Amino acid sequence: MPGIDTDGLSLPKRQTPASAGYDLCAAKVVEIAPGDIVLVPTGVRVRMPDDEYLVIYPRSSLAVKRRLALANAVGIIDADYYGNEGNGGQIFVPILNFGQSLAIIERSERIAQGIFQRYSKVDEESTEFVKRTGGFGSTG
């Protein structure tokens, strides 16, 4: 992946047979000052069918043990995010440090989990759509 060294990183995986979420790890060391939000790269891209999306949730221990949270509470990765012009579809996780001290996220540290979901569309829908042209928050 351009700009991110993914050598040695593991693919996202479920930790137990009953786990719904695939753990996402940080692709590099990131420092987050108190009160700041940083987009943490994962080095991961995901290709999905058009009727599927990936929901990004924080790992439950992130808030309690680290005083860190997903800045947007939950993230949605649409199927057309993959391969977009802005960043090739790499997943970034926006982390907020609500603690009082500097937080350091280590490379390969599990920071979030992704759960695949299917959705339905209405029959009578406008065909006037925008083209995704960028990375994080790319539809405006």
Image (cartoon, rainbow, N blue to C red):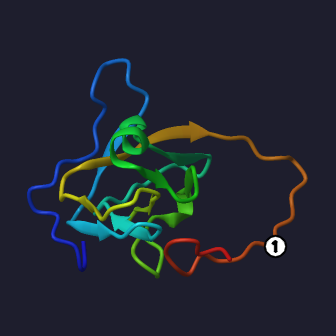
- Write the residue at 25% across / 58% down: 105
Residue type, mark 1 in image: Glu
Query: On screen, 40 above or below 17?
Result: below
- Residue depicted at 21% across the width and 66% down the height: 28
* Lateral position of residue 54 relative to residue 25, left or right: right
| Residue 78 figure quarter | bottom right
In the image, residue 25 sits, relative to residue 31, either above or below, namely above
> Residue 42's spot in the image, x, y percent?
31, 60
What count of labels does the image hold? 1
> At 86% from the left edge and 64% from the top edge, which residue is drawn?
126
Residue 81: x percent and y percent? 51, 65
Q: Quadrant of the N terminus?
A: bottom left
Q: Nearer the viewer, residue 98 or 3?
A: 98
Judged from the image, the secondary structure of the residue bearing numbered disc 1 is: loop
Residue hosting label 1: 128
List x then y, in percent, for residue 136. Answer: 51, 71
Q: Residue furthest front?
A: 100
Residue extending farthest to the left is 8
- Please identify the quadrant where the C terminus is shown: bottom right
